[in-house]
Amino acid sequence: MVHKAVQSFLEYMQIEKSHSSYTIQFYKKDIDEFIHFMKENGIGSFKEVEYLDARLYVTTLYEKKYARTSAARKISSLRSFFKYCLREKLVSENPFLLVIQPKLGVKLPSFLYEEEMEQLFLACDVSTPLGKRNRALLELMYATGIRVSECAEIEDKDIDFDFSTVLVKGKGRKERYIPFGDFAREALLIYIEKGRNELVKQPSAHNRLFVNGRGGPLTPRGIRYILTELMKKASLNGKLHPHMIRHSFATHLLNNGADMRTVQELLGHSHLSSTQVYTHVTKEHLRKTYMNFHPRA
């Protein structure tokens, strides 16, 4: 009964709520961890879970030293799950409804400076098919600010070279068109004509734009690996998280005078508040510039 309820919920989130497979995996992981907690505490079914049990579970998350963001996500996942169970009359109450989530501090997004982005581009060895792919991948991600998961799902037909736009399927399967510039356009054409054709040696069962060394679809994990390797080749300090490309895209647009609403639409943010975090970054950039160059700073 327990596992049947979980499976039903996951299907609901995937089919009716149109969540990505990546998000579904997190829901499953969070619920499975709570089921393990239930077994350890002799709770046999979801009906038996009470508010005090939910409070105790949150306490165990803190004891295991989960980051606030991780703990908040787990609580949110379970709240959504029990809300579904309540709707389906599988439980009589939502024990996580009144559980207080940890307050999250505003974490400024990390980004790369334009000079650092240039070093990444130069790290791509465009004499090889994989190097051509890496250059096209990096150029498109920086040109559009798309998420790794969105990038992995792009198909050949989603690229319109006449208008230099790409159709992106975002969170909740919301679609948006994003323009890209000449650098990305040229890199994509070279990759498609001289790189992808060499990697996909026979008629493929998929239409994904970016492929791995064997010609199969490039996964989000594969994209992360590529970016990490480029970071090493460029001799840049620190670890390159894929979202840093997205953060760099938004930060550089705002630094160069783009308006907030346009950046919000390009990023695919439902709420302006999600985009406003980048104003903190640009303000910090302005402050540092002022302190470095004003004669009376």
Image (cartoon, rainbow, N blue to C red):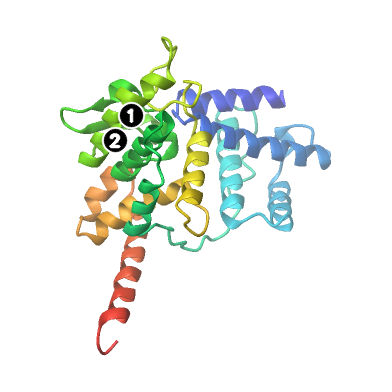
Residue 191's tag is 1
Residue farthest toward the left in the current orientation of the protein? 162
Identify whether 192 is placed above or below 29. above
Residue tagged 2? 187
Identify whether 33 is placed above or below 16. below
Provide residue 59's location: percent of width, then percent of height: 71, 55
Question: Looking at the rendering, in which quadrant would you find the C terminus?
Answer: bottom left
Q: Nearer the viewer, residue 161 or 94?
A: 161
Residue 107 visible in the shown view: yes
Provide residue 72's location: percent of width, then percent of height: 57, 51
On the picture, is 131 further left or further right than 139?
right
Mark 2 and mark 1: Cα distance apart in space: 6 Å
Could you say which quadrant of the image residue 4 lies in? Answer: top right
Query: The residue tagged with tag 2: helix, strand or loop?
Result: helix
Q: Which residue sits at x=75%, y=32%?
A: 45
Give the class, few, some or many, for how many residues have Cα within 10 Å of label 2's Cα (few <14, many ≥20): many
Provide residue 203's location: percent of width, then percent of height: 41, 9
Could you say which quadrant of the image residue 173 lies in? Answer: top left
Residue farthest toward the top in the current orientation of the protein? 203
Q: Nearer the viewer, residue 54 or 94?
A: 54
Query: The residue tagged with tag 1: helix, strand or loop?
Result: helix
Q: Which residue sits at x=36%, y=53%?
A: 117
Instruction: Kindly check if marks 2 and 1 are in contact, taking CB atoms under 8 A apart as contact.
Output: yes
Kind of residue at badge 2: Ala
Residue 272 visible in the shown view: no
Residue 52's tag is none
